[in-house]
Image (cartoon, rainbow, N blue to C red):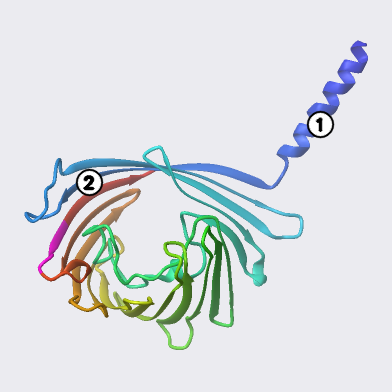
Amino acid sequence: MNNIKKIGLTALAGSLVATSAFAGSMSVSGSAKMTYQSKGAEQVTGNPWSNSKGITFSGSGELDNGFSVSTSYTMSNAAFSATHVTVDMGDSGTFSLMNGTSTAGLNKYKDKMPTAGEEVYDDVDATDHGVVGTGNDNALGYEVSMMGMTASASYQRNGVGTDTSFVVIADDLVDGMQIGGGIGSDTSTATVEHDHSTVWATYTSGMATVGLQHSAIDKPSNDINRMHYAISLAVNENMSVSYGVSTVEFDESGKTDEESSGISASYTMGGMTLAAVMNKTDSIGGSSGSDKSFTEVSLAFAF
């Protein structure tokens, strides 16, 4: 009986060794951020100081056929934030399942304007008007690049319909320039389908990058068009600054244009990033006189 036990334990140990020999690895990274925020005299604010914490579990491995698989799971302040599983098939592209993040499709390219920090409309109010995007909760994505061109698509099934998108990007038409465009349909927030589209161009020369992007959301009663342009300067290998302007036009009667502008700056040294943002939006949501501002200074550490 003792010999039988020894044989069983030896077989179990051998199977564990064989399993651990799989060509994969897991890692954990984290971040800590201290933030000072001011939302202007027109808004009621409490304590301007806050801190946030994040942790990400990442894993990757290679299959016998040469494909590689990677995954990540991110938590912000101990709550779920985003996760994805990606299969890299080499020249055949990458296939992914994404939740709370965008590895392919229109959401990945909804704002391609250069910035040293936040988008010019970010955090001023709860809604980013005129910014295109489709659902990314447990959505499928596929992206492939060849001959200087990239095709990217997404598909999500939700309770009221399906969200789909397709994007094409060209990087090699002109040295330093990227041109792209995409379309998509959004049914995740209404029973009526909304059509989304965007086109953009960015150009980098030396320390400067400039960009222009136009987006449109076609709705049954209120089409929205957004024009956004920005410039960023890499002052040196550690410091960047940027300036941008976004104008949103509402077709709905009685609404005026929403205009946002903002300045961002960031300085990185190793795993530390010091950043500052100053954003201002006039006529939020097309409501004349509804103006808000937002200022933030943050110090972040990556581990």
The relative height of residue 163 versus residue 178 in the rendered view (above or below) is: above
> Residue 263 occupies which quadrant of the picture?
bottom left
Tell me if residue 231 comes above or below residue 160 in the rendering.
Answer: below
- Amino acid type, residue under disc 1 in the picture: Gly
In terms of depth relative to the viewer, which is nearer, 225 or 51? 225
Q: Quadrant of residue 30?
A: top left
Disc 2 versus disc 1: distance between alpha carbons? 51 Å
Front position among marks 2 and 1: 2
| Residue at the image point whose x is 22% and y is 46% from the top | 35
Direction bottom: furthest residue: 173
Asked if the magenta segment contains residue 290, the reply would be: yes
27 vs 231, left or right, is: right
**62 horizontally vs 48: left or right:** right
Horizontal and vertical percent position of residue 240: 26, 65
As rendered, which of 225 and 170 lies closer to the eye? 225
Which residue is more in the foreground, 195 or 183?
195
Instruction: Bin the neighbour count of mark 2 within 10 Å (Cα to Cα): few under 14, some 14-19, many 20 and up.
Output: some
Residue 266 in the image: state x and y as whole percent.
Answer: 25, 59
Element carrying mark 2: strand
Type of the residue with mark 2: Thr
In front: 97, or 36? 97
Q: Position of residue 129 (x, y in %)?
A: 29, 68
Q: Find numbered disc 1 in the image and state the secondary structure of the residue it sits on.
A: helix
Q: In the image, is 180 to the left or to the right of 125? A: right
Q: Which is more N-terminal, label 1 or label 2?
A: 1
Q: What residue range appears in magenta?
A: 289-294
Residue 179 marker: none
In the picture, the disc for residue 35 is: 2
Residue under numbered circle 1: 14
